[in-house]
């Protein structure tokens, strides 16, 4: 056998050995057990990637798959590194429920390792790794700023209006008390016992004033007002004392169109507030003086001139009060927007007076929506379950704008009047109760104190607001339960007591 032949035979043998080795390798692969296979598809999660959720209401995270599943015996599902339990879904066998206990204001990572979820019919079929990042909402207290504005809100707490009692006049002429009762010390004691923290005392001073230039307030009227303020003080209440329905002579429109008229009105405003401020200059910080009520011109859209007058007169009252000295140099003073409207408070044309003491509170009133709360027609229903899908959103949007504009910027702001007339039907009053609870809770979330309007008008219909007797503070109109609910809504820090929990209990039409 020559060399060439030997070389050819060697090459042939090498090729043959390679072929045999390759064939043996194929046979070996077929003999190896299959084992676990990642074949299950993850379809969805009840919490989306990066979502912010409510810690109080989320007790499980549901992951959905394309087949029936169970947790593997050696599963190691973790939430922030701590092992958690997966169980069969409560809705369908194609779900896995991961049971969790969450804390407020925290970031979370859920990890379901590959192989931790398996098919119920074939344990070799497994789901791929699933990782979810999400966070929980901050608590109510954490979501509100820790500033002086919030300190004022907490100080005021839940407030109540002695509505119209001292607005005792008819076109500027004195008459009997508007509500035909005489207040007593028991009124304020019972308000405090019920949980009220602040009483707003509206007073119309004009009918009790003498002629220009002194505009002397009658001693008897001043003494009666002071008696009520001191009764409230003795009961441990804060007091907000204002100039209320003096709008009959405080004509901002006329002042805005005539300089001489403006100067004359300013002189009376100064004379009025100088007397009030001197009378109360030595009272403590429990007393807040409020410049005006709801200056308006037949509720028409104000002119630029009227808005300018509002700013000018607010500044005038602040200057007058501060100049009297004593505790007036540093006490809180409340200044309203035009009409006390949130709309005009949020208007860039509204300016807060300059004040060396830097102790001013913005006052607004809110009876939104008017057709449900005050209008003579009194629309019967309010809220999503009654067919008004945007009702709740409109309230939270407005109050949050006030929060962002004032509270977040360390400017105290309070709702000097809120409320809803007593309705004439069972459904109407159920919606009324729901509205008041929801409104108060939304105000609390916005960091705004509320002061409930009560004009001591029994019965039902437009402008019927009746909770406490103006005489002695006893319960009226079976209102005890509703008042306690409103106080809870404005003060509770229970994380489970949310707008959503109230929303879910709305009355149905």
Image: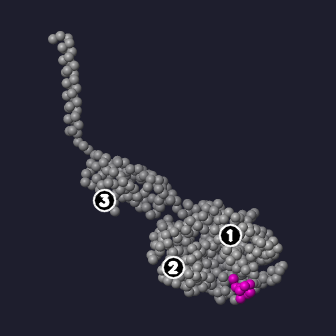
**Which quadrant would residue 287 be assigned to in this image?**
bottom right
For image coordinates 54% across by 63% down, the residue present is 140
- Mark 2 and mark 3 lie on one chain; the one further toward the N terminus is 3
The foreground one among 243 and 277 is: 243
User: Mark number for residue 93?
Assistant: 3
- Mark 1 and mark 3 lie on one chain; the one further toward the N terminus is 3
**Number of the front mark, 1 or 2:** 2
**Which quadrant would residue 404 be assigned to in this image?**
bottom right
The foreground one among 62 and 60 is: 62
- Mark 1 and mark 2 lie on one chain; the one further toward the N terminus is 1
- Measured as percent of width and height from the top left, residue 110 is found at 41, 52
Mark 1–mark 2 contact, CB under 8 Å? no
For image coordinates 25% across by 54% down, the residue present is 121
**Number of the front mark, 1 or 3:** 1
User: Mark number for residue 337?
Assistant: 1
Give the total of numbered labels. 3
**Number of the front mark, 2 or 3:** 2
Toward the right, the furthest residue is 213
The answer to whether 263 appears left or right of 37 in the picture is right
User: Mark number for residue 380?
Assistant: 2
The answer to whether 100 appears left or right of 149 in the picture is left
Q: Secondary structure at mark 2?
A: loop
The stretch of residues the image draws in magenta is: 166-175
Circle 3 Cα neighbour tier, 10 Å, few/some/many (<14 / 14–19 / ≥20) = some
């Amino acid at each position: 056998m020559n060399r060439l032949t030997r070389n050819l035979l060697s090459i042939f043998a090498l090729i043959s050995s390679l072929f045999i080795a390759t064939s043996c390798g194929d046979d070996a692969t077929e003999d190896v057990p299959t084992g676990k296979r990642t074949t299950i598809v993850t379809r969805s999660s009840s919490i989306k990637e990066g979502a912010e959720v409510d810690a109080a209401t989320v007790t499980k995270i549901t992951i959905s798959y394309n087949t029936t599943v169970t947790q593997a015996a050696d599963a190691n599902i973790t939430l922030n590194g701590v092992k958690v339990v997966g169980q069969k879904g409560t809705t369908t066998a194609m779900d896995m429920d991961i049971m969790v206990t969450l804390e407020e204001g925290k970031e979370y990572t859920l990890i379901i390792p590959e192989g931790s979820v398996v098919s119920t019919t074939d344990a070799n079929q497994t789901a791929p790794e699933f990782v979810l990042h999400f966070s929980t909402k901050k608590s109510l207290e954490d979501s509100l700023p820790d500033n002086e504005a919030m300190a004022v809100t907490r100080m005021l707490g839940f407030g109540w209006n002695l509505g119209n009692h001292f607005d005792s006049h008819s076109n500027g002429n004195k008459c009997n008390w508007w509500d035909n009762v005489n207040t007593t010390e028991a009124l304020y004691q019972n308000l405090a016992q019920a949980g009220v923290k602040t009483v707003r005392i509206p007073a119309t001073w004009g009918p009790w004033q003498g002629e220009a230039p002194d505009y002397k307030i009658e001693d008897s009227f001043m003494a009666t007002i002071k008696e009520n303020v001191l009764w409230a003080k003795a009961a441990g209440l804060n007091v907000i004392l204002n100039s209320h329905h003096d709008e009959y002579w405080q004509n901002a429109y006329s002042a805005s169109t005539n300089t001489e008229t403006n100067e004359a009105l300013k002189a009376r405003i100064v004379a009025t507030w100088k007397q009030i401020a001197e009378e109360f200059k030595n009272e403590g910080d429990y007393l807040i003086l409020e410049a005006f009520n709801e200056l308006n011109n037949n509720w028409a859209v104000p002119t630029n001139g009227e808005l300018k007058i509002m700013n000018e007169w607010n500044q005038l009252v602040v200057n007058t009060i501060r100049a009297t000295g004593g505790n007036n140099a540093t006490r809180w003073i409340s200044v309203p927007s035009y009409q006390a409207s949130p709309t005009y408070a949020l208007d860039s044309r509204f300016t807060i007076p300059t004040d060396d003491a830097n102790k001013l509170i913005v006052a607004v009133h809110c009876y939104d929506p008017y057709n449900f709360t005050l209008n003579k027609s009194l629309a019967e229903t309010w809220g999503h379950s009654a067919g008004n899908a945007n009702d709740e959103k409109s309230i939270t949007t407005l109050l949050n704008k006030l929060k962002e504009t004032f509270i977040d910027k360390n400017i105290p702001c309070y709702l000097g009047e809120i409320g809803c007339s007593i309705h004439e039907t069972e459904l109407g009053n159920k919606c009324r109760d729901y509205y008041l609870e929801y409104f108060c809770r939304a105000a609390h979330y916005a960091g705004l104190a509320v002061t409930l309007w009560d004009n001591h008008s029994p019965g039902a219909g437009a402008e019927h607001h009746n909770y406490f007797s103006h005489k002695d503070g006893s319960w009226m109109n079976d209102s005890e339960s509703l008042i306690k609910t409103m106080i809870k809504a404005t003060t509770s820090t229970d994380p489970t007591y949310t707008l959503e929990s109230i929303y879910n209990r709305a009355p149905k039409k």
